[in-house]
Amino acid sequence: MGRRSVHSPEELRQLILDASQTIVERNGMTGLSAREIARMIGYSPGTLYNIFENLDDVLLTLQVQLMGRTLEHMKRVPLGPDREKNVEALAHGYVDFALVNRRMWNLFLAHSLPPGSSVPVLLHDYTNSLIDIVKDQLGPIAPDASRESLDAMARALWAGLNGITAIAATEKGVYLTPATAQSFAKELTTIFIRGLRCQAAHH
């Protein structure tokens, strides 16, 4: 692609990430190696380790970027005055994004943190921002819920949706597949909201 002196460290970093994403989208996580990344960007494999600690560092960075893209996607979901429909729209948008990016989503779900490492702070921040979007819509449906309870509700709902995307994205489900994932998501949100309504009515 170019001589080593052509790219700054930041440009090299992005080249490595772009090449890694391309490899994952084509061949899954098993196709990713320092040698293959280096081949794609025209550098030696050692260059990768000048920019990233190891392949796990590359994979974690890709996951942070993916969650950032997920958050931006969710911010663009059109919302109206009906909170229940908004929750359904957010769930639909989340599942849709996961399935459009299913190879990368599988990476997000399949990659385990190496021993001794921790989840990047930015990944926590993106996730919490995503949960805040959901809480904003659930709050008026469960007006008597405490802040802690509302937070738990939002995380529980999103955990359920993550389960749906995890099964659908692998394309190994019998009934839960990419074609049926949205109907499962709608059923989950409908039952979840019905439960919140019943809970609110008894307070």
Image (cartoon, rainbow, N blue to C red):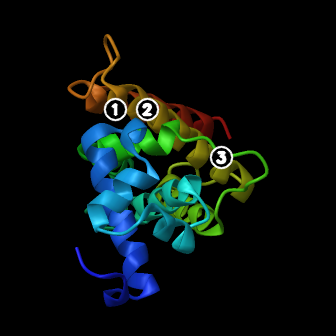
Q: Mark 2 or mark 3, which has the lower sequence index?
A: 3
Q: Position of residue 156 (x, y in %)?
A: 59, 39
The secondary element bearing badge 2 is classed as helix
**Looking at the rendered structure, which numbered label has been put on residue 113?**
3
Look at discs 2 and 3 and give the one toward the viewer.
3
Q: Are marks 1 and 3 in contact (CB under 8 Å)?
A: no
Q: Mark 1 or mark 3, which has the lower sequence index?
A: 3
Comparing 29 with 192, the one in front is: 29
- Horizontal side of 112 relative to 174 (left or right) equals right
The secondary element bearing badge 1 is classed as helix
Comparing 67 with 132, the one in front is: 67
Count of labels in the image: 3
**Looking at the rendered structure, which numbered label has been put on residue 169?**
1
Going by the numbered disc 1, the residue's amino acid type is: Ala
**Residue lying furthest right in this view?**
116
Going by the numbered disc 3, the residue's amino acid type is: Leu
Q: Position of residue 1 (x, y in %)?
A: 22, 73
Q: Position of residue 103 (x, y in %)?
A: 32, 41
- Horizontal side of 74 relative to 56 (left or right) equals left
Going by the numbered disc 2, the residue's amino acid type is: Ala
Look at discs 1 and 3 and give the one toward the viewer.
3
Residue 77 position by quadrant: bottom left
- The residue at which mark 2 appears reads as 166
Measure the alpha-carbon separation of dots 1 and 2.
5 Å
Is residue 31 visible to the viewer in this orientation of the structure?
yes
Residue 38 position by quadrant: bottom left
What residue lies at 36% left-to-right and 82% top-to-bottom? 4
Q: Position of residue 15 (x, y in %)?
A: 34, 71
